[in-house]
Image: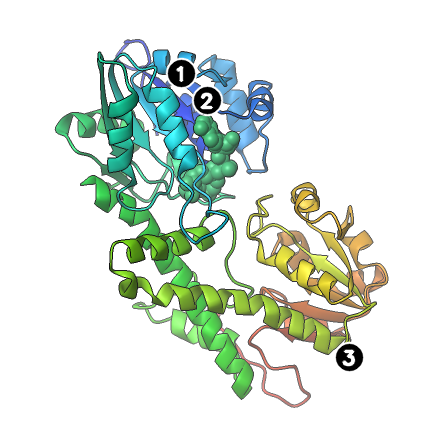
Amino acid sequence: MSTSNENDGAAPQRITVVGTGYLGATHAICMAILGYDVLGVDVDPGKVDRLARGDVPFFEPGLPEKLAEAQATGRIRFTTDFDEAADFGEVHFICVGTPQKPDSYAADLRYVQSAVRELASRIHGDALIVGKSTVPVGTAADLAELADEVSPEDARIEVAWNPEFLREGFAVDDTLHPDRLVFGVASEQAEATLRDVFSPIVDEGVPVLVTDIPTAELVKVAANSFLATKISYINAMAEVCEATGADVDSLSAALGLDDRIGSRFLKPGLGFGGGCLPKDIRAFRARAEELGVGDAVAFLAEVDAINIRRRTRTVDLIRELVGGDLAGKRVAALGAAFKPNSDDVRDAPALDVARLLYLEGAHVTVYDPEANSNAHRAYPDLDYADSLEEAVVDADVVALLTEWSEFREASPASLEEAGAHPRMVDARDVLDQEAYVAAGWEFRALGRPAPQAGRVAARVPAH
Ligand SMILES: NC(=O)c1ccc[n+]([C@@H]2O[C@H](COP(=O)([O-])OP(=O)(O)OC[C@H]3O[C@@H](n4cnc5c(N)ncnc54)[C@H](O)[C@@H]3O)[C@@H](O)[C@H]2O)c1
């Protein structure tokens, strides 16, 4: 990919990115790499200071290097000053959070509203405000009205939506080489601006879908709902396997080899979490109900419930393995982040399991290669270890809750040598059950029968 838009000799275009969390910081840094002059804006001065010092405030592989590269070009700055942001350029991306409301399933839109209010009230002349945050359908129309209400008379502001599909852990690559770009626009002018801004990516042949704004808003929640449904589908099959002695691992492999189904997102385990899928499916339900089409997505309630049941089922397996009572038992909880290669503990299944174990009186020691400090902030009552070896010392049972490669690659012998009692619950279905059993471990995995002598082990082709 050409990594600059400066080939015509014109001054690079200027872009602001409002909200510099996981999404916004990545977007801002990648836009600077692509050749734009970028101003990142956040209300959190601590975050702004760290980014300005070249320190990415969260774990994302490759992003610190990209920030250093962008800063070396002098094309990126960070500020808390909305006056500066409104003056900076004509394209403003909104990347602030849209968490679940504390008292309902709906999305809390106060941050996007505040970002648009702060920006629009200071804009003079032409501007395109491009939402990237995940929002309920209809939000952009309300924000356009808000911008109109608060902006000075000489402002001509248009709102567009460009939903973001990046995955934490792959954020840089997903931003620079996305599967597709979706431009939700209300005018040809807005489409032309977005095509121009994303030209280094579009020129690579990345498909662009130009839609009306409500469709663009919906694409993101529809995609996340589909992914969540696929994960919960296989986890529902795991529940049935648990009741019948069947093996969900083999079942999933057999289903996944069908081209019409596909194996991705068909991995049984502890289910989904994080700052997106859980709150997005809930917000979708809430919005659909407001629109009078709640029945159309009522199934998402079951998708959510299946997902949460995997957490209690994991606790059940751990309890069973230590003899039926968790009180006073030492559990090594491997993993806290909602998925590997991330330090994000928002709605993390691993931490939820650790918390449930703690509530039953277990002595829980958590170890995550990157998420310990975020986890400690969320759950200070749990114990935290600085290494895998330290976590498993004297553990009555080890529970693999986030599938970091460090845990996948640890050998059963080394864990036992480090002091673990040889009992393993693999809640992510990633360990070599036969190797653990051969090394003398009692081994349980979600959706899989307990290993028994003489049972035919499933042979799943590598794919
Ligand atoms: N994290 C992901 O992988 C991902 C992927 C796709 C879409 N999204 C969506 O992107 C949005 C942001 O998610 P995130 O994970 O980056 O959240 P985040 O919490 O990491 O970042 C949000 C940032 O917005 C800042 N902020 C809040 N109010 C502000 C305001 N008025 N002005 C300026 N900054 C403000 C916060 O201080 C914070 O730094 C959400 O809608 C999310 O659903 C996230």
Circle nearer the viewer, 3 or 1: 1
> Amino acid type of disc 2?
Val
Tell me residue 171's x, y (percent): 46, 39
Q: Quadrant of the C terminus?
A: bottom left
Q: Secondary structure at mark 3?
A: loop
User: Which residue bears the numbered disc 2?
Assistant: 41
> Amino acid type of disc 3?
Gly
Q: Earlier in the sequence, mark 1 or mark 2?
A: 2
Q: Count residues near mark 2 (Cα–Cα under 10 Å), then give few for <14, some for 14-19, many for 20+.
A: many
Q: Are marks 3 and 1 in contact (CB under 8 Å)?
A: no
Taking the spot 58% from the left edge, 64% from the top edge, the residue there is 428
Taking the spot 66% from the left edge, 74% from the top edge, the residue there is 317
Tell me residue 438's x, y (percent): 73, 76
User: Distance from label 1 to label 2 (Cα)?
Assistant: 7 Å
Q: Earlier in the sequence, mark 3 or mark 1?
A: 1
**304 with respect to 139 (left or right):** right
Tell me residue 341's x, y (percent): 57, 46
Q: Earlier in the sequence, mark 2 or mark 3?
A: 2
Looking at the image, residue 284 lies above or below residue 426 = above
Q: Quadrant of residue 399?
A: bottom right
Q: Quadrant of the N terminus?
A: top left
Res. 323 mark? 3
Q: Is residue 199 visible?
A: yes
Taking the spot 73% from the left edge, 76% from the top edge, the residue there is 321
User: Distance from label 3 to label 1 (Cα)?
Assistant: 60 Å
Q: Secondary structure at mark 1?
A: helix
Q: Count residues near mark 3 (Cα–Cα under 10 Å), then give few for <14, some for 14-19, many for 20+.
A: few
Tell me residue 22's x, y (percent): 50, 36
User: Which residue bears the numbered disc 1?
Assistant: 85
